[in-house]
Image (spheres, grey):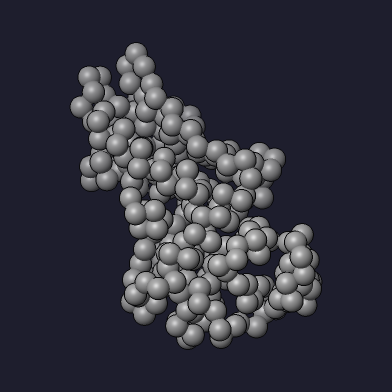
Amino acid sequence: MGRRVVALASEDKTLQLVAAIENDQHPLLGQDAGDLAGVETLDVPLSSKWPNDADVVIDFSLPEAIDRCIEKCELHETALVVATTGMTDAQVERLNEASENIPIVWAPSMSLAVNLSMKLAQQITEKLLDVPGGLDIEIIERHHRYKADAPSGTALKFGDLIAEKLGDDTKHVHGREGHTGQRTRNEIGYHAVRVGDNPGEHTIVFGMLGERIELNVAASSRDCYAAGALAAAKWLNDKPEGMYDMFDVLEM
């Protein structure tokens, strides 16, 4: 993801890449970020040293890196776009605390299509709440074999947004095995698939007696996430401190 952010940023004349950050043990430290991303040389070496002249930082890393990222952004009063998933409750709390000092866009997916689909999922749920026979909602997500967290942060966000329409007694059920009994009326089911190099796909199934709706959104490459993160960075640049999401960026 870092390489795709670098590549797309290098093509945008309104943006200037000032740093590409990695951990201090990374074997490619010192190499040019543009060369690594497969574009022109940008004279920006991969480094573990934090810049002091950045307007916005985009974090597309791992939960292990987010604490240092927040610390440095607060220190330099730098706006922050967070696309990292799998954070602990303590890290989420820390991120919210930081939003009192700096502007932050935090979303489990930077994809335009995903965020539009989230709005559609809420609207479908709202319209089918009282359908005769009841409504069953299942979320199936597919990602590449290297993804470390399951279900995806995007799947969980879909579930949270749908639960807002279903009510406070909604149960989140992760997978099924054995003699589970009948499906309860107030649950959302999650199923995670890890195959090959799939960059991300989510299917929300709305099941009713006699018919169903399947809302599917799938990435064909990681560029949709990189482009969304760059759009979020542009939007965030002049915003006051606070916590924002992609719905804010897209003005939905």
Q: Using the image, determine if residue 229 lies above or below residue 93.
A: above
Instruction: Kindly give the residue lying farthest to the left in the view shown.
Output: 130
Give the residue displayed 40% in from the left and 49% down from the top.
157
Q: Using the image, determine if residue 175 lies above or below residue 111.
A: above
Please indicate whether residue 112 sits to the left or right of residue 147 in the image. left
Q: Nearer the viewer, residue 246 or 128?
A: 246
Please indicate whether residue 68 sits to the left or right of residue 246 in the image. right
Please indicate whether residue 36 sits to the left or right of residue 241 in the image. right
Instruction: Kindly give the residue lying farthest to the front in the view shown.
Output: 13
The N terminus - image quarter: bottom right
Q: Nearer the viewer, residue 177 or 142?
A: 142
Residue 181 visible here: no
Q: Nearer the viewer, residue 118 or 238?
A: 238
Q: Residue 247: x percent and y percent?
A: 37, 53
Q: Using the image, determine if residue 11 lies above or below residue 80.
A: above
Q: How many marks?
A: 0
Give the residue displayed 65% in from the left and 61% down from the top.
11
Q: Residue 70: x percent and y percent?
A: 48, 76
Give the residue displayed 44% in from the left and 71% down from the top.
237
Q: Residue 213: x percent and y percent?
A: 39, 25
Res 116 → quadrant: top left
Q: Residue 190: x percent and y percent?
A: 45, 39
Give the residue displayed 52% in from the left and 81% down from the top.
72
Q: Using the image, determine if residue 178 lies above or below residue 227.
A: above
Residue 47 visible here: yes
